[in-house]
Each structure stands twice: as structure tokens, then as C-alpha cells.
Image (cartoon, grey):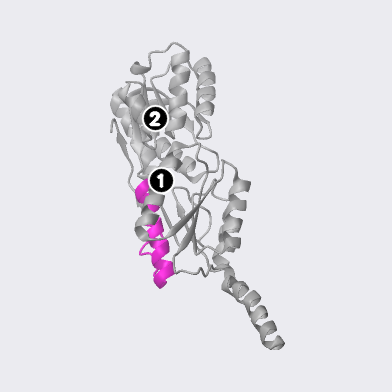
Amino acid sequence: MRRILLTVLVLAMVLPMVAFGGGRQEAASDQIVVGMSVPGLQFPFFVTMKDEAEAAAASLGIQLVFADAQNDSAKQAADVESFISRGVNAILISPMTVDALVPVIEDAVSRGIAVATVDRQANTDAVLVHVGADNVEGGRAAARYIIEKLGGSGRAIQLEGTPGASAAIDRKAGFDEVITGSGIQVLASQPADFGRAQGQTVMENLIQAHPNFDAVFGANDEMIIGAIEAMRGAGLDVSSIVTVGFDATPDAFSYIEDGLLGATVDQFPGEQASRALQALVDFVQTGRQPAQKVQLISPMPVEGR
């Protein structure tokens, strides 16, 4: 009898360890668990993405475990490592920069955990799918908006996003491509790290260096709002300056309604997240590969809700 009891105790200890073998979680139920990480909830765009991803997860019947990277690549890498240790079935990540998360993404995939990127890309082919906005086209759309509003000539300032982030790289590339072929002179193009405070500080300095300008493009809404506040602080007539942001956040629409912002580029974060989650669920459940490894949604300028 003592031998039988000892065998039962050993099995009770060993079986849970086996259940987590290979980095995959075998929960008591069959519910799929997906870890989700975004650069930071201080950015309204990612608040919207999180909320809509949670709604999509509920409709799919899966569990979403969320982590806020707080605009820190090291923390985001640690969060993904925590997902791996937990044994999630899949990971949905918007990486801070194109390179910083590559090692942990590839580690997760090597352990049998499917990874999808959303909004921002990573420099690795290991991901199952990337779903995001066509940020190059979004930058082009912003440039076209400025050209149209200025009648083809004038002077513009560009506020860039976080250096090394795929969204920042692509939006600038699209904007530069179109604006270069126009009669618009770009007086300055500087990073403001996708932040409102940084956007305001950078714009305050640029107003001193380039007091005569006709338009400002901020590669996200937080930066353009910061720039608008800098212009207001300098006593400029903001309504006479063409301004365009990117992300279609609630604050951007409030500024548009108040006549302080011309337009924002909508890139549909909810659709990005729901498509990526669906691809992960299909793969975990059936092994089905997405029809396209890179899926891009066309963004568009909007001048109101």
C-alpha cells in the first residue's frame, strides 16, 4: 500500500511538469491563451488596440493575457519571456523597434509558440503573420493632404516617431517620397518619439529655428497635439496652419472639432488586432497558415468622426 501511495505522489508531481513541456500550456480546459504586448498604454492608439483586441478575444472564446511595455524594450522582452515561461499558446506583439525583440520572438517560436506582430514589425521571418497599416501609404496620404491644402507650394515641418520603430521608418519614407516631388519645402524633420511632451518640446525649438512655416505633419496624434500646443504657446494662429496627425485617436478628433487640427490618418487598430488574433487561433487549432504572411490595411486621412 505504501508503494502504491508513493507512486501516486510521484505521478502527481510529474504530470504537471509534462503538461508544460515545449513551452505550450495544457490548461484544464481547451481555452487558447494568447499573450499580448504593446509598446505602451501612454499612447492612446494602443489603448484602443488593447480594448478592441479584448473584445475580439471574447468573441473568439480565447483568454488574452496583457502586458504593457511602458515604452521600454527591455521590459517588453522580459514580458515576452514571461509569456513563454507561462506556456501561452500564442503571442501577439507590437514590438518597440524592428530589432530589439527579435531574439525573444525567435525563442518563443522555437518552443512551439506561434507569434504574430501587429502595427509594428520585427526583423525576423519567424512570425506567423504581420497585420498592420500600410504605413508607407499612410505617410504618402499625409503628404498629399498637405499638398492639396497648400495648393502645391509652401513650407512644412515633419515630426518623426521613435527611431528604429517600423511605423516611424515607414511613415517618414512615404511622406518624404511624395513631398519631395511637390513644391513643398521641408524645413526640418526631427524625431519626437511618438510622445506628446516630446512633440511639444521639439516643436518649440523648431519654431525658434524656423518661424515661418505653413504645415506640420506629426507621425502620430500625440506628437501633432504637442506641436499644436507649442504653436498656441508661441501665439501662432493654429487655424491658419495645415496640420495632420496619424492614428485617429479620440483626442485627435477633439482637436479637429475645436478647429485646431486639420486631419488625422486612421489605421484601424481594432481590425489589425482582430485579424492577427484570428490567424493565431486558426494556427493553434488546426495548424492552418495564413494566406498572406504580411497583411496591410490601407490608412486614410479623416477630418472628423
Crowd rating for badge 1 (residues with CA inside 10 Å; few <14, some 14–19, many 20+): some
> Which amino acid lies under the numbered mark 1 shown in the image of this protein?
Asp
**Residue 269, located in which quarter of the rendered image?**
top left
* Kind of element beneath mark 2: helix
> Which amino acid lies under the numbered mark 2 shown in the image of this protein?
Asp
Q: Is residue 78 visible?
A: yes
Dot label at residue 70: none
Q: Is residue 100 visible?
A: no
Above/below status of 288 relative to 75: below
Given residues 1 and 274, the one toward you in this image is: 1
**Residues drawn in magenta:** 270-295
* Kind of element beneath mark 1: helix
In the image, residue 232 lies at what x, y percent?
A: 44, 15
Please tell me which residue is depicted at 42% across the width and 32% down the height of the picture. 221
In the image, residue 272 lies at what x, y percent?
A: 38, 50
Given residues 222 and 148, the one toward you in this image is: 222
Question: Quarter holding the C terminus?
Answer: top left
In the image, residue 106 lies at what x, y percent?
A: 57, 61
Above/below status of 245 relative to 290: above
- Please name the predominant secondary structure of the magenta segment in the image: helix
Indicate whether residue 139 is drawn in magenta: no
Given residues 263 and 155, the one toward you in this image is: 263
Question: Quarter holding the N terminus?
Answer: bottom right
Disc 1/disc 2 C-alpha distance (Å): 16 Å
In the image, residue 268 lies at what x, y percent?
A: 35, 44
Q: Is residue 132 left or right of residue 7?
A: left
Residue tagged 1: 51
Above/below status of 260 relative to 301: above
Front disc: 1 or 2:
1
Badge count = 2
Residue tagged 2: 251
Please tell me which residue is depicted at 34% across the width and 16% down the height of the picture. 240
